[in-house]
Amino acid sequence: MEEYELTPQQINAVYLRCNAMPFDQLLGFCLNPMSGITIEGLRGVNYKQIDRLEQAFNDQAKEKIWEASQNSMSSLMDYISKIEQGLFSDTYLGDAKVKLAKLAKLEVQDEWDKLSNSTDVNAINDFVNKWEYIENFINRRGGNFDSNELDDARNKIEIIANGTIVEDFNNLKAIDDDYKRVTEINAFIQKYARNSSKTAKDYIDKASELLQWTQENIASREAWYKAKESDTIKDYVSFISQYPSCRYREEADERIKQMKGDLLTDIKRFPFNYKREDMFEYINSKTLTYDDLVTKSYILTDKGYNHIMRYPHLWDEQRALPVSSLENPHSQEGNTDIYFFGVPGSGKTCVLAGLMSLSGQLGFDFDPRGEGGGGPYATELCNYARSSMLPPKTDQTFIQVIDCTIDDEEHNSHNISIIEMGGEKTRDFAFMQNATSLEDLGPGAAGLLQNDNNKVLFFVIDPTNEKYVVMDDGSEQLIKQDNVLNCVASLLAKNDKLMKKVTAIHIILTKSDTLGEYADAHVIEDRLTQQGYKAVMSRIKKICETYDINKATGFQVGLFPFCVGKFMPGDVYTFDETDSLKILRVIQANTTAVRQKTWGERLKEWFNS
């Protein structure tokens, strides 16, 4: 068949009228590579017999295509690919692979001869990329293409790269300005990104590492300035955990070492200053370790440490206390009423918790369902103390009355009512203008305080709280604990009937472990004097003299240190009954035994029953 080339107009005419043209004529056009008519073109114009035409074309063209493909690497690679796709038979597949390898060796030699003297790294890279593709194409199909020229090209890139990459990289390391170095490193990586040499890849990796180090150095410097500005051990520890290998590590370690010693000393000396959240944060941030707090310093016990980690917040372990909300609480007739006065947070609840935990000692017991209404409250307080857990803040608007009994040394039973006066109401009373009514001390206070029962008064003071007492609404007035105590004492002294029933007045200083190792009455008196209680103490002593109270002690107010246990930082402690038992003995000594009914009284009750 004669081969000739069609004009563009003729090619368009054939594609437009293909479905009307003779089949053999179209086949002839397709077999003629110069015609410009192809199977793909006819498929594109939706020739109706395209599958038949393609089959006939493949049957007749394989010899011709094989013959035409033998002098071109790209044609041979295309021919082999079509055989693999099933378009041609594999009759000449082996010959095609051999021919392709021979042509490749000739062409790679020719191309490298022209390029071997060049120093254009990009051109040599293009050469390497092209011939690596051809090498893979041949060798993956069982061929054998091993080009010395390709190896030479790779070596040449290495030689060229070594002369520039190493020098450029060393220049990066010599830059002092971190911000400028970041810019130059990015330019370096972009410059050599197309370089396929091993040297280039190695130094791009090194540049990437240098970039990361430089960026961390910038970040660590900024973080270091912030840490130094705040100058807290927590911030220094956080800094090291974030930048463990930075240039400021040694200085940060030294600062932590200095501050940790001071911190541990302060924690040991003032454990109440460190709340649960504070200690959890110190431990959780690794500012202070188990060794620091337990093994070496004995600041915490193992149980205390684990308790903090289990309950990061104090409220995690606390339940709302079942306080009584009686508007008119009362104490049974004939009881001795034991009153506890104090502002919110003074420690009254802890004192009561310690007392309730002594159930069974000195014949002491409380009625969990007593008429006073405070039985459930007492039960919960008892459990908190025995579990070495701090009770939560209570709603102290209402007065809590706990019905109890206690034996004296002769085993005579005493009926007593332990009465916790509402802390909020006690505080509010000091803020009132011209307050003169006992009822101002809380709902039902007047009825309780004016009954005919004998009374013992305890004023509870927190010696660590020297701040002004603050109202719930956030307003602040210049009133402290001693002012509140003075106001309450003044009100009580004006009620003659009440004071004639008072048999003892005592002061309890809670958190006594903050007063030193040996906190006796003299230490307490000194602390109270320092904190401005001297005038109040004089007022109470005059009251005692007027009403013959505390006569056995020369009318002096009893001063008792109290701590519910060995306190540790983080609001954890180990319960210790020592101080609670001392207060209980004071109560025991100031109560009256229950009078035994006469035979006639019992007979009268029998007739009336």
Image (cartoon, rainbow, N blue to C red):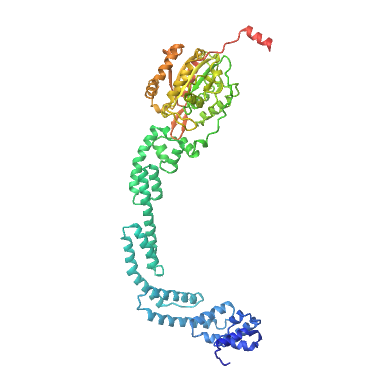
265 or 550, which is in the foreground? 550
Q: Is residue 363 above or below residue 571?
A: above
Q: Is residue 570 above or below residue 99?
A: above
Q: Is residue 66 left or right of residue 261?
A: right
Residue 540 at x, y percent in the picture = 43, 17
Q: Quadrant of residue 89?
A: bottom right
**Tally of numbered tags:** 0
* Quadrant placement of the N terminus: bottom right
Q: Quadrant of residue 545?
A: top left
Residue 459 at x, y percent in the picture = 46, 21
**Can residue 183 be seen?**
yes
**Can residue 63 be seen?**
no
Q: Residue furthest front?
A: 433
Residue 578 at x, y percent in the picture = 46, 24
* Residue at x-position 45% and y-position 39%: 280
Q: Is residue 298 left or right of residue 419?
A: left
Q: Quadrant of residue 295?
A: top left
518 or 233, which is in the foreground? 233
Q: Residue furthest bottom?
A: 2
* Quadrant placement of the C terminus: top right
Residue 414 at x, y percent in the picture = 55, 15
Q: Is residue 374 left or right of residue 194?
A: right
Q: Residue furthest top?
A: 600
351 or 16, which is in the foreground? 16
606 or 182, which is in the foreground? 182
* Residue at x-position 48% and y-position 36%: 307
